[in-house]
Image (cartoon, rainbow, N blue to C red):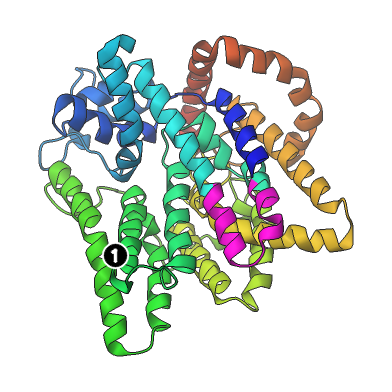
Amino acid sequence: MKVFAALFALSLLFVNPYLRGDGNGYYAWLRSPLIDGDVDFANEYQRADPMFRAGFIDEAGRPAREMTTPAGRAANQWSIGPALLWLPFFAVAHVLALAGAGPADGYSPIYLWSAALGTAIYGFLSLVLGVAIARGMRVGRWAVPAAAALLGASSLPVYMYLLPFHVHALAAFATGLFFWWGLLRVDEDERSVVQAWAAWGAFGGLMVAVYFVHAVFLVAVLWRVARTHGAKERAVRLAAFCAGALPLAALHLWSRWAVYGSFGTGYRDEFFWTAPRLLATALSPEHGLLLWTPIVALALAGLLALARGDARARVILVAWALLFYVIASYQNWHGQSSFGNRFFVSLVPVFVPGVALALDWMRGRARLLPAAAIAVLCLWNAGFVFQWGLNIVPSRGPVNFAEVARNQVTVVPARLGATVMRYFTGRGAMTREIEADDLRERDRYRLQR
């Protein structure tokens, strides 16, 4: 674990404090109340990247009519939970800014760097929690290599380093915390039952406040309650959980009311519950989960094997299946410009035990097979991220995997050195160029749709 932590510390050099897209909505919940003292996000949106700003601000610089809520505010469908996780890092940055490290406006580099580094740290902590879950499920021998493999071969690094203001790495931490406590600690903790379940409620409230769709993971609470003997004991545990979740639930409801004047989420997207895109969500070249990030298939195989003897693995699989059905029913099941299917990044911590068991199985067949599998998966993923991040392959819509494979051995090696050098010496200009390319690709994608 010490080596893993040291490698993570070195990896922080790759963090890009790039505030764009959905990140503007999440970050506005942090900056606007703390710097402006309000929840009027119009001025935050005016400073957003061109693609985001065009969707919310009209040519006169005011919130677009269709993006103005019944309460008269600029719409903000994104959750308030990420702001809570960024808050300690933002507070440090604010103190430094007041001390002269930059303008105390919430947007100077000290703020963006602090929040972005915070995201990367939370992403790493999600893997630490995954290691703890794997050890608690008695597959700890390969837990650290499994966590390292998921860091290198999943979609998580994109949202830890390249797009740190998106929610997904933060969601992985919140989900990992919820499952770690609920699967391993809540009934084994030395504190009172009420305290332990209230703490779990707080973690569950944070998980949902960070990402609304995580409410499906509360099925784990029902499982724990069902395993408790006695109606009174079940009632006490459930009441304690609800009491623990109440403060964050109230904060979430306030955030909806403050912006919309109602308790709706603010999302306008549709769900097609009777026609889920199950096969496409798993295997489509348009961000299919298993096709873009095959390490997830390894994780699921390991969890299925664990599930034969461990009810906790069965709970994880049920949680994954519920999320999979919800996402497959969503109109944007592909995540649009997602790397892989970003909606499943939050499950990375609970994928660790599955990958750990799969690696252990490989070790029993051939001594070097686990290392070879990790190397292949990580190298493929790194090259794929390189192509996706530079718009060598489309970030929206389906990709041609034959082209991706050719690029892995031709384009990626040829461009890698110069691109990495420029990333460290001219990151801002490089990011703006990629942003302009992405805007043109978005327009082509809309025309095709």
Q: Which quadrant would residue 311 be assigned to in this image?
A: bottom right
Q: Residues within 10 Å of mark 1 (few under 14, many from 20)?
A: many
> Residue at the spot x=33%, y=23% of the render?
93
User: What amino acid is at disc 1?
Assistant: Ala
Tell me: residue 393, above or below residue 156.
above
Q: x and y percent of residue 128 in the render?
A: 55, 49
The verdict on residue 143 being magenta is: yes
Q: Which residue is more in the foreground, 409 or 216?
A: 216
Q: x and y percent of residue 310 in the render?
A: 60, 76
> Residue at the spot x=52%, y=60% of the render?
277
Q: x and y percent of residue 33 in the render?
A: 18, 32
Region in magenta: 127-147
Q: Which residue is mark 1?
A: 198
Q: Which quadrant would residue 273 be assigned to in this image?
A: bottom left
> Residue at the spot x=16%, y=40% of the render?
69
Give the prevailing secondary structure in the magenta stretch: helix
Provide the secondary structure element on which disc 1 rests. Answer: helix
Side (left or right) of 283 relative to 414? left
Residue placed furthest toward the bottom: 230
Q: Which residue is more in the foreground, 397 or 204?
A: 204
Q: Is residue 199 visible?
A: yes
Q: x and y percent of residue 406 in the render?
A: 79, 32
Q: Is residue 393 visible?
A: no
Side (left or right) of 416 relative to 49? right
Quadrant showing the N terminus: top right
Residue placed furthest toward the front: 190
